Image: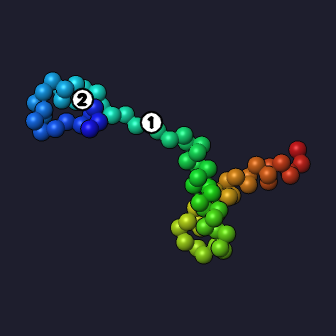
Amino acid sequence: MSPIQVTPEKANSAGTAQLAAQPLVIAAANVNDVMLEQLEYLIEHAQGGICGCAQCTRYLRARSVLMEVFADSTRPN
């Protein structure tokens, strides 16, 4: 049994109060990793062709935003 599990016999013990005072905190995922995973998912989905579904629309929006930097670099100053 893990140290955080409480059996019914010990439900009213001091250990229960201690567990209640220490909430479980789960660290957030790295935002860059999540964005990269989503982008890879959208690219994989779109490789079969643009079908017009919600995922394809998300892919086209993300692609247009990411491609803006290249459009700006080809314009003369």
Residue type indicated by callout 2: Leu
Image location (x, y in percent) of residue 73? 83, 48
Query: Where does the N terminus fall, quadrant-wise?
Result: top left
Distance (Cα) linking label 1 and label 2 = 19 Å
Give how far across and how far down residue 34 sits, in percent.
Answer: 55, 47
Amino acid on which the number 1 mark rests in the picture: Ala
Identity of the residue drawn at 63% across and 64% down:
44
Q: Is residue 50 left or right of residue 73?
A: left
- Residue identified by numbered label 1: 27
Read off the residue under disc 2: 19
Q: Residues within 10 Å of mark 1 (few under 14, many from 20)?
A: few
Q: Is residue 75 left or right of residue 42?
A: right
* Precedes in sequence: disc 1 or disc 2: 2
Mark 1 vs mark 2, foreground winner is 2
Check the image and report above or below for 59 versus 10.
below
The numbered mark at residue 53 is: none
